[in-house]
């Protein structure tokens, strides 16, 4: 659209001022690491080259010394640039993405690695997803460091810093340097004409110089490209962290069950038998009553131990397989559950156990949240894949949100190369399918 002639100069002035402002912002965002390298390089040169200053050795020795001093300065610059990159690249890249969205309408999303959760193990140590620590504070500190400094997105931000320093910085700085240089030349005697020409050229180029930022931002400020191997490594790290937390939670459940149940009853039995021992001669009837109570307590403790063991490794699963174990779950469910199976034989034991506990958790979720009256469990096997589909007529709206039970099931199935499919519209019905590749026995 062509502006009126009267508005032409005003528009050019506004675009020139806007271009100078944006160029100055880009110089600030892309010049931090080069500025640190320049300062360290100049200071390091003053220090390093003073080592051989005034030497009377032969030219060959002086040349070797100069080469070593130069290499030392290069190392100092590299170390300073790397440390600066670790500290500021993420902040500068996020600011650059905000400028790209505000100036160009480019919404660039980056995926930074989140801080993994910290888990207290039964041994008393803290697990941060990679290693064990003696204190929670140390575990949290190392988790933050690993998430921040070993993030592929941070390395990609470092590549943006290099590209920006080599391309965006010099082009964006041209109008600013031209204005400063032209002003200096204008104030110097005999260079007024050259100074005016340089300033005029800088003002003409100001609306365009900053636009080099657009294509480079679209190419280098987005999410870090990940190879198939890199994605698989991240998946395995997430699975390992999840399994470690699951193991810790299971150990805590077992410890709590033993402490609050069987252990307390065994202690009570010991005290009862001690009391019976003291009364057996003086009051045999009372001793008999105490021993009878102790026998009842032992039966209760035994039942609790059996219940605890069934939660760890259900005997029906070990003895009769997945189908009968799921049918046993259906009998204990608070809602009516129908189990249909087309599995011809038993799958591999680890897969069988994983699918069983997944179905158990899905049935527990139905009882807690779905408000369902009928549930159907379909077990099937086709194309070397074992599937278990839980369908309910409840309120729907189930989703594998972060930290939910469905998310945990999905991660555990991923450990076996499987997946979790959820179809749960609001109002129901809900169909959740667990699929795991395996071979039947």
Image (cartoon, rainbow, N blue to C red):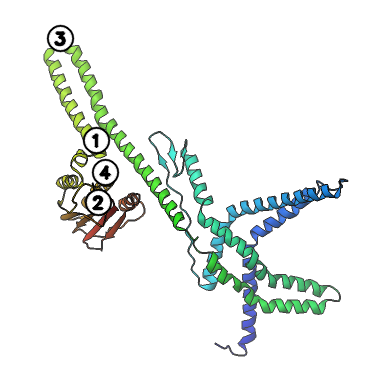
Determine contact: label 3, label 4, CB under 8 Å. Answer: no
Judged from this view, the residue extending furthest toward the bottom is 5
Using the numbered discs, state the Cα–Cα distance from disc 3 to disc 2 in whole angstroms: 58 Å
Task: Find disc 4 in the rendering and name its residue.
Answer: 349
Determine contact: label 1, label 3, CB under 8 Å. Answer: no
* 156 vs 418, nearest the viewer: 418
Task: Find disc 3 in the rendering and name its residue.
Answer: 282
The image shows a total of numbered marks equal to: 4
Q: Which of marks 1 and 3 is nearer the N terminus?
A: 3
SS for tag 4? helix
Crowding at dot 2, Cα within 10 Å, few <14 / some 14-19 / many 20+, comes out as: many
Q: Note whether 295 is above or below 191 in the view shown.
A: above
Which dot, 3 or 2, sits closer to the camera?
Answer: 2
Residue 333 in the figure: left or right of residue 178: left
Residue 204 in the figure: left or right of residue 158: right
SS for tag 1? helix
Determine contact: label 3, label 2, CB under 8 Å. Answer: no
Using the numbered discs, state the Cα–Cα distance from disc 2 to disc 1 in whole angstroms: 21 Å
Task: Find disc 2 in the rendering and name its residue.
Answer: 362
- The disc placed on residue 309 is 1
Q: Which of marks 4 and 2 is nearer the N terminus?
A: 4
Using the numbered discs, state the Cα–Cα distance from disc 1 to disc 3 in whole angstroms: 41 Å
């Amino acid at each position: 659209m062509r502006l009126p002639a009267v508005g032409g100069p005003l528009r050019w002035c506004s675009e020139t001022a806007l271009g100078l402002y944006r160029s100055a912002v880009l110089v600030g965002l892309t010049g931090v690491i080069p500025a640190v390298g320049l300062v360290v390089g100049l200071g390091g040169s003053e220090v390093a080259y003073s080592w051989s200053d005034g030497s009377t050795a032969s030219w060959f020795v002086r040349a070797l010394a100069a080469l070593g001093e130069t290499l030392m300065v290069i190392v100092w610059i590299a170390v300073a640039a790397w440390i600066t990159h670790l500290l500021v690249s993420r902040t500068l890249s996020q600011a650059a993405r905000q400028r790209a969205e505000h100036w160009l309408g480019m919404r660039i999303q980056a995926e930074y690695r989140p801080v993994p959760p910290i888990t207290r193990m039964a041994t008393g140590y803290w697990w941060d997803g990679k290693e064990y620590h003696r204190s929670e504070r140390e575990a949290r500190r190392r988790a933050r460091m690993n998430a921040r400094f070993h993030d592929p997105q941070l390395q990609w931000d470092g590549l943006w810093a290099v590209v920006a320093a080599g391309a965006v910085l010099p082009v964006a700085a041209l109008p600013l340097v031209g204005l400063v240089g032209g002003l200096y030349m204008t104030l110097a005697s005999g260079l007024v004409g050259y100074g005016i020409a340089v300033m005029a050229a800088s003002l003409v180029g100001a609306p365009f110089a900053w636009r080099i930022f657009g294509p480079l931002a679209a190419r280098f400020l987005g999410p870090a490209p990940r190879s198939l191997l890199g994605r698989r490594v991240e998946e395995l790290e997430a699975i390992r962290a999840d399994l470690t937390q699951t193991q810790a939670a299971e150990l805590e459940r077992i410890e709590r069950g033993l402490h609050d149940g069987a252990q307390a009853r065994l202690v009570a039995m010991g005290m009862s038998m001690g009391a019976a021992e003291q009364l057996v001669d003086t009051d045999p009837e009372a001793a008999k009553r105490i021993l009878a109570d102790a026998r009842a307590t032992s039966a209760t403790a035994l039942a609790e131990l059996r219940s605890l063991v069934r939660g760890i490794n259900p005997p029906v699963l070990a003895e009769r397989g997945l189908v009968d174990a799921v049918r046993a779950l259906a009998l204990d469910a608070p809602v009516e559950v129908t189990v249909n199976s087309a599995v011809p034989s038993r799958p591999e034991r680890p897969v069988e156990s994983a699918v069983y506990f997944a179905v158990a958790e899905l049935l527990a979720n139905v009882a807690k949240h779905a408000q369902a009256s009928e549930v159907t469990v379909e077990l099937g096997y086709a194309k070397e894949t074992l599937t278990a589909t839980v369908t309910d007529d409840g309120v729907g709206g189930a989703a594998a949100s972060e930290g939910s039970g469905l998310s945990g099931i999905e991660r555990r199935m991923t450990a076996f190369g499987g997946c979790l499919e959820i179809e749960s519209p609001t109002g129901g019905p809900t169909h959740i399918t667990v699929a795991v590749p395996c071979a039947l026995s």
